[in-house]
């Protein structure tokens, strides 16, 4: 099972990278909105926190590297990996609290709640990272003025990250029930 899970983690890393790079909606903040977060969440829900987190972080980081967003790549690895870990842990914790006869309808709710928690971390993670990135870009180091400018600049990206997160949660909630049984059946047959 570990070999197949590792292969699927590599596949999801590649899918995350492609979904992030292929469909881009540019934002006024020099970033873009993409469906890559849906694959980040699917990695979390289908592969679990370890393999899903690594797939999400590596795939998203490569999208930044290939797309020319070099200064974001290290932060993206950490933020997207933790987004997947949080989503997976929350979803699994909720699933354990629900009786099996309710699991079908409740499963979608669990993925949405887990996805929202993970994506909330993504929004906060990029907000904090961009504060320091923008503060350093001013040339004043981490002075109060530079940090204030970083907060003002970083805050403009929050709405776009929220839209990206919501889109990712909705798309993952639609696709997860379709992919869950075939993938788990395949992984179990080793």
Image (cartoon, rainbow, N blue to C red):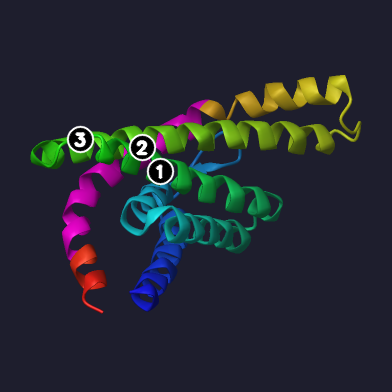
Q: Residues within 10 Å of mark 2 (few under 14, many from 20)?
A: many
Residue at label 3? Answer: 98
Name which residue lies at 20% across and 35% down. 98
> Can residue 168 be found in the magenta stretch?
yes
Where in the figure is residue 7, as x and y percent of width and height? 39, 75
Callout count? 3
Residue at label 2? Answer: 114
* Numbered label attached to residue 89: 1
Where in the figure is residue 156, as x and y percent of width and height? 60, 25
Residue 2 vertical placement versus 179 (above, below): below
Q: Secondary structure at mark 2?
A: helix
- Comparing 87 with 152, the one in front is 87
Q: How far apart, in angstroms, are the residues tagged by discs 1 and 3?
A: 15 Å
Comes first in the chain, label 1 or label 2: 1
Comes first in the chain, label 1 or label 3: 1
Report which quarter residue 101 is drawn in.
top left
Report which quarter residue 134 is drawn in.
top right
The reply to whether residue 49 is in sight is yes
What's drawn in magenta, residue-wise?
A: 159-182
- Comparing 92 with 112, the one in front is 92
């Amino acid at each position: 099972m570990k070999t197949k899970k590792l292969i699927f983690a590599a596949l999801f890393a590649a899918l995350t990278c492609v979904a992030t790079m292929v469909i881009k909606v540019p934002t006024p903040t020099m970033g873009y909105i993409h469906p890559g977060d849906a694959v980040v969440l699917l990695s979390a829900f289908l592969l679990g926190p370890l393999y899903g987190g690594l797939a999400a972080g590596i795939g998203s980081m490569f999208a930044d590297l290939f797309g020319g967003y070099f200064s974001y790549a290290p932060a993206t690895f950490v933020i997207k990996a933790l987004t997947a870990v949080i989503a997976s842990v929350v979803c699994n914790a909720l699933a354990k609290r629900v009786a099996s006869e309710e699991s079908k309808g409740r499963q979608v709710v669990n993925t949405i709640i887990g996805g929202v928690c993970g994506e909330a971390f993504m929004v906060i993670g990029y907000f904090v990272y961009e504060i320091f990135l923008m503060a350093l870009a001013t040339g004043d180091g981490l002075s109060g003025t530079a940090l204030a400018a970083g907060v003002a600049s970083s805050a403009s990206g929050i709405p776009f990250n929220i839209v990206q997160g919501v889109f990712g949660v909705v798309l993952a909630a639609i696709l997860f029930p379709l992919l869950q049984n075939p993938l788990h059946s395949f992984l179990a047959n080793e």
